[in-house]
């Protein structure tokens, strides 16, 4: 039986990945900061699907938290076959309204943690000749909007580059770029959602099902909804200045989690 490790596993897209993978018979390593919530989730998934669900409490905004997950990913006795780098957050406010400490924390979680955990996981996967990594970014990666979008753009470029370097190794890397998803993301960041049209909202479980299908097909970039695929097609030909104005009116950033 294969094992998947999911960061940011207790809510939103991460929880949807946990539900889907458990239902498919994968053992899980669930990573988040809230130990009590992790244990409750692990018990529920074990009881419902008969899989083993390991709990790993870690704060990926700290070196100690990242190191704890790196250690688990490099445990050759209990290999991880699929890594889902989903942990992330948003900051409310425009550039210079958000503290530098919060901006740097975002880069730590969205970029440094993704780099280090992907590297830790892929080392063993390459040796075994199989495995997969899903790095969760956002359609915000494709529009000019703040540190959040910039960090997610880095995730897209990093994943695509690493996927090319590992081509033929048996290890699949894919970046997932959702739009607005009904999760706790905006509430946690203190962002209002009243100005977001209803058609732009996605369901986390359907999104994850589509993402895993894209991973199985060997895609490197997954935009798991026809509406957002069409929207991102328009983004490629729209003036950058116009895109900045549109994202200002729809909120500081697209928040997938």
Image (spheres, rainbow, N blue to C red):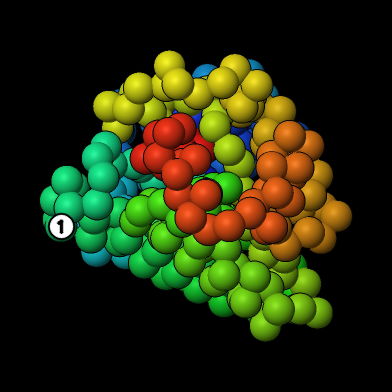
Q: Residue at x 67, y 64 (%)?
A: 173
- The residue closer to the viewer here, 190 or 31, is 190
Q: Residue furthest bottom?
A: 165
Quadrant for residue 50, please give it. Answer: top right
Q: Is residue 240 above or below residue 34?
A: below
State the SS at label 1: helix
In the rendered image, which quarter is residue 205 located in?
top right
Q: Position of residue 45 (x, y in %)?
A: 57, 25
Residue 37 can be seen in this image: no
In screen coordinates, is 188 left or right of 195?
left
Disc 1: which residue: 100
Residue at horizontal 23 percent and vertical 60 percent from the top: 104
Whole-percent x and y of residue 71? Answer: 39, 65
216 or 123: which is nearer to us? 216
* Residue at x 24%, y 40% (from the top left corner): 93
Does residue 173 appear left or right of residue 103 in this picture? right
Q: Residue at x 69, y 42 (%)?
A: 231
In this view of the protein, can residue 44 be seen by the observer? yes
């Amino acid at each position: 039986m294969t094992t998947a490790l999911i960061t940011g596993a207790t809510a939103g897209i991460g929880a949807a990945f946990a539900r889907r993978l458990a239902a498919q018979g994968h053992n899980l390593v669930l990573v988040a900061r809230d130990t009590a919530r992790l244990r409750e989730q692990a018990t529920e998934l074990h009881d419902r699907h008969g899989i083993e669900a390991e709990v790993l409490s870690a704060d990926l905004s700290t070196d100690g938290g990242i190191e704890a997950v790196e250690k688990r990913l490099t445990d050759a006795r209990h290999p991880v076959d699929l890594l889902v780098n989903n942990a992330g957050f948003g900051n409310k406010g425009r550039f210079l309204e958000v503290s530098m400490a919060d901006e740097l924390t975002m880069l730590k979680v969205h970029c440094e943690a993704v780099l280090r955990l992907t590297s830790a996981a892929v080392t063993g996967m390459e040796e075994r000749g199989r495995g997969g990594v899903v790095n969760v970014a956002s359609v915000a990666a494709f529009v000019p909007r703040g540190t959040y979008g910039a960090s997610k753009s880095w995730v897209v470029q990093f994943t695509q580059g690493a996927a090319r370097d590992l081509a033929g190794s048996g290890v699949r890397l894919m970046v997932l770029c959702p739009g607005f998803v009904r999760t706790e993301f905006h509430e946690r960041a203190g962002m209002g959602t009243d100005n977001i049209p209803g058609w732009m909202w996605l369901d986390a479980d359907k999104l994850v099902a589509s993402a895993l299908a894209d991973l199985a097909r060997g895609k490197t970039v997954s935009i798991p909804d026809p509406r957002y695929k069409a929207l991102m097609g328009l983004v490629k030909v729209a003036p950058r200045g116009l895109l900045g104005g549109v994202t200002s009116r729809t909120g500081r950033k697209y928040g997938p989690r």
